[in-house]
Image (spheres, helix red, strand yellow):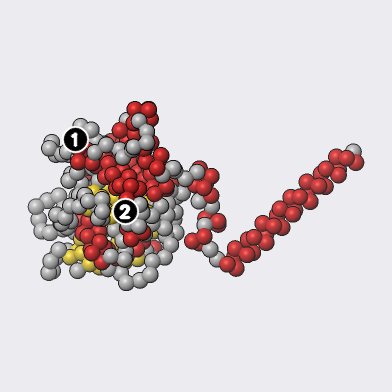
């Protein structure tokens, strides 16, 4: 049975302290009785892409989702059997899309990376923002994991530090498809494409570009990939299986679907570059794109079909006061009035300075 909790200051710090004590004491290293297994899962991705909805459904919580403010923490517990310790999943969710990527350093720490997984949620209904969101967030998360691992190796010699540092480097089986051509993400990664109900209304050619590109990225980073919609109980159930695999080590099932006319469901290691094929382009010679590497080539092809959002639009996202999902009519009206008063004050000051200069 799954249990869950929402953020409370005492619970959060008690859990954090208990986790540190657990890690430092070496609990679980011996051959004694059953011990509590703790894992951390960090969700990030498209703004308003459905991260909270997915988390609530996976935790079996029947409540309406609310916009995530910055970074939120919750946890889930699951008993492995009757009268057995309950495993704990520490769950972090980053809001704001890419605008708050600096907060990634909070959930990715020396304590967490030994059991950390990352879930990247991408809104399939907004393909023009998809590549940029993926690129910025994965780069920030990977940089933080590597920074923590490097700092652990440089710190004082200690078994626990080195154990955490080693865990940040994934070792793939020798028979892993395209082992020499991929760039494994340093911790287990799950890519979830959301709002499939809207995505399936796209033109066939555009759907194929998005599907092939996400298959390439998932395989390149050794990630699992699944498309879902909160409106489909079947897809939610499959998504929950992948999530529970990361959070509690449960079996994620054997379903594999690579058919572009259906929701993609591809566990890590079940795909290959030969199955994915070349980038989907018909109107340009691939050699003329001057790509630096395979990933850059896929990016150039993808952005010819779905040009990335302008930097100006992305800069606007960094001001939460202008974000419609945080709107407060009375406060916003007062803010607008004060902004007008400020502009009028600036004009009056400028005018008075000009008059002063003319008089002198």
Q: Quadrant of the N terminus?
A: bottom left
Q: Quadrant of the C terminus?
A: top right
Q: In which quarter of the image is residue 78?
A: bottom left
Whole-number angstrom distance, CA of label 1 to CA of label 2: 25 Å
Q: How many marks?
A: 2
Q: Dot 1 surroundings within 10 Å: few (below 14), some, or many (20 or more)?
A: some
Across and down, in percent, residue 287 comes to 34, 27
Q: Quadrant of residue 56?
A: bottom left
Question: Who's the residue at 33% across and 41% down the image?
Answer: 142
Question: Who's the residue at 71% across and 58% down the image?
Answer: 341
Task: Give the labeled residue for mark 1.
Answer: 179
Local SS, label 1? loop
Task: Give the labeled residue for mark 2.
Answer: 193
Residue 52's mark? none
Question: Who's the residue at 44% across and 43% down the image?
Answer: 308
Is residue 111 rendered to the left or right of residue 95? Answer: left
């Amino acid at each position: 049975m799954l249990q869950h909790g929402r953020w409370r200051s005492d619970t959060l710090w008690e859990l954090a302290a208990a986790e540190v004590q657990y890690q430092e004491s070496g609990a679980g290293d011996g051959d004694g009785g059953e011990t509590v297994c703790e894992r951390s899962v960090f969700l990030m991705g498209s703004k308003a892409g459905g991260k909270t909805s997915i988390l609530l459904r996976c935790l079996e919580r029947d409540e309406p989702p609310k916009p995530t403010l910055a970074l939120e923490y919750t946890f889930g517990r699951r008993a492995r059997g009757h009268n057995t310790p309950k495993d704990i999943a520490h769950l972090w969710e980053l809001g704001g899309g890419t605008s708050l990527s600096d907060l990634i350093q909070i959930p990715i720490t020396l304590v967490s990376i030994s059991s950390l997984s990352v879930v990247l949620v991408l809104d399939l209904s907004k393909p023009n923002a998809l590549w940029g969101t993926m690129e910025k967030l994965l780069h920030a998360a990977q940089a933080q994991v590597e920074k923590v691992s490097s700092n652990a190796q440089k710190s004082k010699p200690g078994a626990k530090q080195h154990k955490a540092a080693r865990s940040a480097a994934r070792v793939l089986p020798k028979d892993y498809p395209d082992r020499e051509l991929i760039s494994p993400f340093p911790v287990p990664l799950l890519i979830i494409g959301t709002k499939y109900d809207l995505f399936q209304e796209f033109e066939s050619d555009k759907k194929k570009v998005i599907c092939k590109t996400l298959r390439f990225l998932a395989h390149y980073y050794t990630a699992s990939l699944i498309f879902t919609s909160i409106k489909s109980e079947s897809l939610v159930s499959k998504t929950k299986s992948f999530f529970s695999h990361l959070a509690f080590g449960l079996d994620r099932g054997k379903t594999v679907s690579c058919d572009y006319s259906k929701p993609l469901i591809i566990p890590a290691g079940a795909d290959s570059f030969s199955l994915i094929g070349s980038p989907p382009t018909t109107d340009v010679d691939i050699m003329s794109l001057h790509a630096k590497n395979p990933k850059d080539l896929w990016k150039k092809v993808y952005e010819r079909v779905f040009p990335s959002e302008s930097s100006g639009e992305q800069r606007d996202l960094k001001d939460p006061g202008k974000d419609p999902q945080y709107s407060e009519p009375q406060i916003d009206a007062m803010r607008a009035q004060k902004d007008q008063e400020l502009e009028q004050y600036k004009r009056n000051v400028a005018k008075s300075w000009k008059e002063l200069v003319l008089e002198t």
